[in-house]
Image (tube, rainbow, N blue to C red):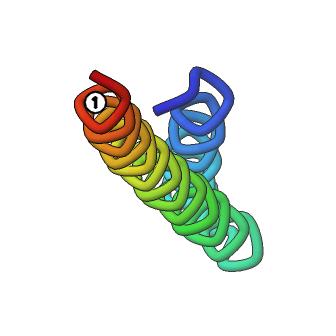
Amino acid sequence: MGLEDKADQLKGNAKEALGDVTDNEKLQNEGKADQLIGGAKEKLSDAVDGIKDKANEVAAKVEDKRDEAER
């Protein structure tokens, strides 16, 4: 999870709250969109991290098997 993703979500929360207070529907919707975008980026980042972790795990197993075969 990146700080930028959280910042997008916080910015969205602030925009939505300001839109609520000022009864500005456009600002409310922009805030909701910012929150959704931040959340999507966060989930994508988490998925990429998971894929990298799995790839490293598989690579380590392949290397271990190669080392065993060389003995």
Q: Is residue 56 above or below residue 28?
A: above
How far across and down, in percent of the image, does residue 46 sit? 41, 48
- Residue 65 position, x and y percent, is 27, 40
Instruction: Say left or right for 66 vs 39.
Output: left
Residue drawn at point x = 64 percent, y = 48 percent: 15
- Residue 1 horizontal/vertical position (percent): 46, 33
* Residue under label 1: 64
The answer to which of 23 and 46 lies nearer the viewer is 46
Inspect the image, locate mark 1, and give the three-letter code of the amino acid beneath it: Asp
Q: Position of residue 35 (x, y in %)?
A: 53, 58
- Is 21 placed above or below 33 here? above
Residue at x-position 73% and y-position 64%: 27
Q: Identify which residue, 8 or 14, lies in the foreground.
A: 8
Q: Quadrant of residue 37?
A: bottom right
| Residue 59 vs residue 15, the one in the foreground | 59
Q: In the rendered view, tell whether residue 5 sits above or below residue 67.
A: below
Residue that appears at 53% across and 48% down:
45
